Image: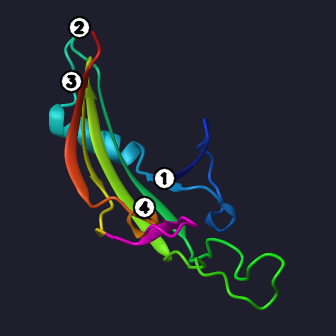
Amino acid sequence: MRLAVHRGSKQATEPADPQRVLGALDLVWGAELLEECRRLVDPLGKRAAGTMPFGCEASANVSHAGSFPNMFPFVPGRPGVAQPLYDFTDAWTNVNLYAGTVIGDLSITAYVENLFDSSSITYVHPEAFLDARYARMRPRTVGIRAGYNF
């Protein structure tokens, strides 16, 4: 198993110390999974000349944030007077799973996003209208993505 760390558009795939990683962790099962996928598609291990290349990958993405306030607790210029819109977000953890394969120009990926179906509050907007004030995590989503390279 190798540990891949994604930060913005850069990716580092060298072994990393998980205690020092500030971004999302992406656990990728490399060579073992690829060999298992190849064995399932071609059990004899012999690919005829001119056949399509094959590859697959699986990953788990885990994101976490602790609870935090949406603003300063007191009204500016009035020490000790509580801010009426002061509130905290929930502490949340989001887990996404992906498994996919590429066969020639066709790619197929199965996914589960928000695996534990958390509905935690991730943002509190400092306004009085309750309808748009709280942002929640998206519900669990399960699906298959397919693509073809023309």
Which element type, helix, strand or loop, lies under badge 2?
A: loop
User: Looking at the image, is mark 2 or mark 1 earlier in the sequence?
Assistant: 1
User: Looking at the image, is mark 3 or mark 4 earlier in the sequence?
Assistant: 3
User: Looking at the image, is mark 4 or mark 1 earlier in the sequence?
Assistant: 1
Which element type, helix, strand or loop, lies under badge 3?
A: loop
* 35 left or right of 123 in image: left
For mark 1, what is the residue? 26
Q: CA distance from mark 2 to mark 1?
A: 34 Å
Q: Quadrant of residue 113?
A: bottom left
For mark 3, what is the residue? 46
Q: Nearer the viewer, mark 3 or mark 1?
A: 1
Question: Mark number for residue 50?
Answer: 2
Q: Nearer the viewer, residue 135 or 16?
A: 135
Q: Badge 1, how many Cα within 10 Å: few under 14, some, many 20+? A: many
* 62 left or right of 35 in image: right
Can residue 66 be seen in this snapshot? yes
Residue 11 in picture, x, y percent from top left? 60, 40
Q: Nearer the viewer, residue 62 or 29?
A: 62
Which element type, helix, strand or loop, lies under badge 4?
A: helix
Task: Say which amino acid is labelled 1.
Answer: Asp
* 21 left or right of 106 in image: right
For mark 4, what is the residue? 132
